[in-house]
Amino acid sequence: MLDRPTYDPGFPGDEILIGGVWQRCADTLEVIDPSDGTPLAQIARGGAAEIDRAVAAARAALDGDWGRMSATERGRCLTRLGALVAGEVDRLAEMEARDVGKPLSQARADALALARYLEFYGGAADKVMGETIPYQSGYTVYTLREPHGVTGHIVPWNYPMQIIGRSVGAALAMGNACVLKPAEDACLTALAFARLAEAAGLPPGALNVVTGLGAEAGAALSDHPGVDHLSFTGSVPVGAEVQATAARHITPVTLELGGKSPQIVFADADLDAALPFLVKGGVQNAGQTCSAAARILVQTDVFDAVADRMAEAYRALTVGPALSDPAVGPLISPKQKARVSAMLAQAEPDQILATGHLLPEAPEGGCYVLPHLLGGIAADHPLAQQEIFGPVQILMRFETEQEAIALANGTEFGLVAGIWTRDGARQMRMPKRLRAGQVFVNTYGAGGGVELPFGGVGKSGHGREKGFEALFGFSQLKTVATHHG
């Protein structure tokens, strides 16, 4: 269990875990609290040498106690870990809020989701089965699901706990040994998770955590010949680099990248039900969500009503320090604040329909950007095409269902889409025509949906995590054919 307050800068964030041993590196990196810009902690600056040792430790675990565990034993270990996480939800939430600037209630929801992922994959570990295949006379043929071996996990800063749960949780359930490289801007809950994993009885080397810069530790992990599978969540440019690097070793990669997801509101929609989902889908986690509803497509008959109601909701949005639990917290870093601000500068003043407001207690050193609701943006404008990754939503008008589909599919991304309509035929017809990995009808996000396979098409990536499907992604199929005369 954690033995120090999660808000204590003395928390041992300057150590990495390799082969069951916590150890320091020669250099460290400073962690900044985005709510006020002050130093929060130090993390170790691991690099290629540490990654190499972590991969070796993972390989040794596969040949040792972890590799000898039955699926049932692995599941029980993950279930214990989930219970430990559940017991530390409040402390993990506070750590995450300070580390990444996420409002406290949203950070708490992420900690609960991590516990649920572990519960789900703990229960699923011994439920992955092969098949028998009818074949020629004299043969018995069957398939086995086996782990890849050593899996690498490069996790971003926006949802570290959730993404650890969906990728590391599933990989461990299938019997892989993991090397986790968290984003340098969000390492504290990853390190806390590793300590809880030890307390749950995870054998040494089954989980290794190396903190450091993406260009150093992350690049070394994606280029390591001893890694059998990579999971990467992050930006399109970095994802392309990771895939190209891994290709040199023919290492399979699951990529979950960006999005420019639409919610489509038809004239017959229940606007009272839709409104909270329309707004929250764009501003949750300050819009730093790959599946954020960045575009709200509204049929002309109800466009003005939706615009008015969303503008009213935006003006009520509070922006402030994470621990005060505002509607919107700071962005992760000054770099991200500058990027989002530069993109917002492309909007004309009359295209800004509404903004949120900054709380008086928000420190000047925080990375705050007000939520912006925009209108009158052309479909081919960079603001309507590029991922902003900030609390910005664009209202767009359509006349017909066909036009809505063309607008929704009119970017290089294809991660999530939402549809709001009472028309039953349209509810069945539209999802098949939308270019997206997930489609929600009369809802959006479905509360995180641990059980729901997640991933995209186009530049949103490929492969699927979450749900039972992730267990297939973190395993490989072996066919066994026996001739017995």
Image (tube, rainbow, N blue to C red):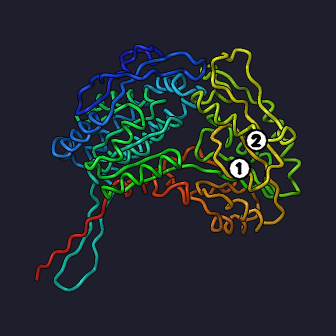
248 to 101, vertically: above or below: below
433 to 119, vertically: above or below: below
Q: Which residue is mark 2?
A: 346
Q: Residue at x 65, y 68 (%)?
A: 433
Q: Residue at x 71, y 49 (%)?
A: 382
Q: Secondary structure at mark 2?
A: loop
Q: Residues within 10 Å of mark 2 (few under 14, many from 20)?
A: few
Q: Which of the numbered marks, if any, corresponds to residue 382?
A: 1
Q: Quadrant of residue 290?
A: top right
Q: Residues within 10 Å of mark 1 (few under 14, many from 20)?
A: some
Q: Secondary structure at mark 1?
A: helix
The x, y position of residue 103, in whole percent, is 61, 27
14 to 310, vertically: above or below: above
Mark 1 and mark 2 lie on one chain; the one further toward the N terminus is 2
- Asked if the residue under mark 2 is in contact with the one under mark 1, i.e. CB atoms within 8 Å, the reply is yes
Q: CA distance from mark 1 to mark 2?
A: 8 Å
